[in-house]
Amino acid sequence: MRDYEFQLLDAIADNPTVTQAGLAVQLGVAVGSINWYIKRMVAKGYVKATRMHRTRLKYHLTPEGVAVLARRTAEYMEQSLLVYRKLRIAAMETAVDIQSKGIECVLLQGDSDATDILRLTLLEHGVVSTSESADWLVRCVGHDYYLESCNDVRANNRLHESGSTT
């Protein structure tokens, strides 16, 4: 199942009386595309449309639609938990590394879920994370954490600012 199909089933499950125009706005696609997607979902047996008024339809997920939506939701949750577990392990390894170096405060750089996981893990390990200033910097890049001396970072920045390359 493709993402747009999952999003469409989810939106219909949330509000069976939603219009095609409303779905288009919600999913960020053209109304004509929504019409085409709904016809595909009906053909696959995931959605049933019934007439509410002369020009208005009400959408229902069929048992097959509910099953496929539940299966996709479970897959998404399992994938999300797998990513969380990997981030949590990396965060704990980083926290232990920081503690083993006797570092008590780090400058935490990044604004993502990975950064939040690291921030909470550092808190559990008694390491203060700040966004102001510290001797050590932890950068969150994707799903990885990098510990660097702020002195090295400052020196590197000065080299780049002066145009030197070594």
Image (cartoon, rainbow, N blue to C red):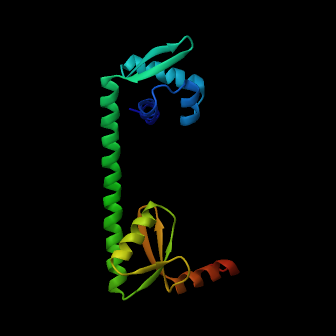
- Residue closest to the eye, 140 or 61: 61
Give the image location of residue 121, x and y in percent: 36, 71
Residue in view at x 43 percent, y 34 percent = 14
Residue 93 in the image: above or below residue 55: below
Residue in view at x 34 percent, y 58 percent = 84
Residue 143 in the image: above or below residue 98: above
Q: Residue furthest bottom?
A: 102
Tell me the quarter of the picture where residue 97 sits.
bottom left
Q: In which quarter of the image is the C terminus?
A: bottom right
Residue in view at x 35 percent, y 33 percent = 69
Give the image location of residue 116, x and y in percent: 44, 66
Give the image location of residue 126, x and y in percent: 36, 81
Q: How many marks?
A: 0
Can residue 37 be seen by looking at this rendering?
yes
Tell me the quarter of the picture where residue 113 sits.
bottom left
Give the image location of residue 57, x and y in percent: 50, 17
Q: Residue furthest top?
A: 54
Residue 42 in the image: above or below residue 25: above
